Amino acid sequence: MTYKITSECISCYLCQPVCPNGAIKLFNNRFWIDPHLCTNCSGSVNTVPQCQASCPTSHGCVQESTDYWESWFTTYNRFITKLRKKQDYWEKWFNFYSQKFSEKLEQRSSAK
Ligand code: SF4
Ligand code: SF4
């Protein structure tokens, strides 16, 4: 299991210079970790993975699971936790949806 960079990455460039193996690459303005170079920082003087330790986001850089379902549930739990924190999320979503729907109805009735 190596580390990977997720969609929560804000491209702050903090992790790239601290990787002891040069495993963090930039392609099309997106960071990614070369799994052939990442050693999880084991065997180096670092006691913790430097990319994760330097990342200012909570899940910008995470250990990749080789198990499909474990990885799926980790992502699922992360999104559910995010949604639970935003208690007004569905209310805002519903208001926005209602507003757009009303606009469409008005456009349709004025076109007749
Ligand atoms: S875990 Fe260590 S070796 Fe792997 S990408 Fe992060 S800093 Fe580099
Ligand atoms: S430190 Fe985190 S947010 Fe910054 S570039 Fe690396 S993965 Fe992205």
Image (cartoon, rainbow, N blue to C red):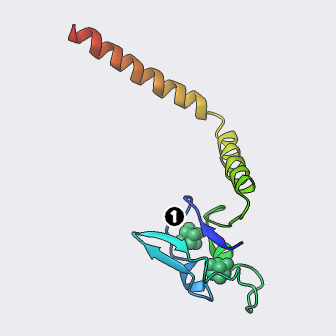
- Is the distance from the Cβ of mark 1 to the nearest ligand 2 atom less than 8 Å? yes
Rendering coords of residue 89 (x, y %): 59, 35
State the count of labels. Answer: 1
Describe residue 40's horizontal placement relative to residue 99 as left or right: right
Q: Say above or below: 21 vs 110.
A: below
Locate the C terminus and report the quarter of the image it occupies: top left
Residue drawn at (70%, 40%), measured in percent from left and top?
Answer: 84
Q: Quadrant of ligand 2?
A: bottom right
Report if residue 50 is visible in the image. no
Going by the image, does 50 lie left or right of 98? Answer: right
Corner quadrant of residue 1: bottom right
Residue type at mark 1?
Ile
Q: Quadrant of residue 3?
A: bottom right
Q: Position of residue 76 (x, y in %)?
A: 68, 47
Q: Which residue is mark 1?
A: 10
The residue drawn where x is 31% and y is 13% is 106
The correct choice, above or below, for 50 with respect to 10 in the image is below
What element does badge 1 sit on? loop
User: What is the residue that sits farthest to the left in this orientation?
Assistant: 111
Query: Is the residue marked by circle 1 packed among few (<14), some (14-19), or many (20+) residues within 10 Å?
Result: few
Please provide percent x and percent y for residue 8.
57, 59
Whether residue 3 is situated above or below residue 65 in the rendered picture: below
Question: Closest to the observer: 57 or 22?
Answer: 22
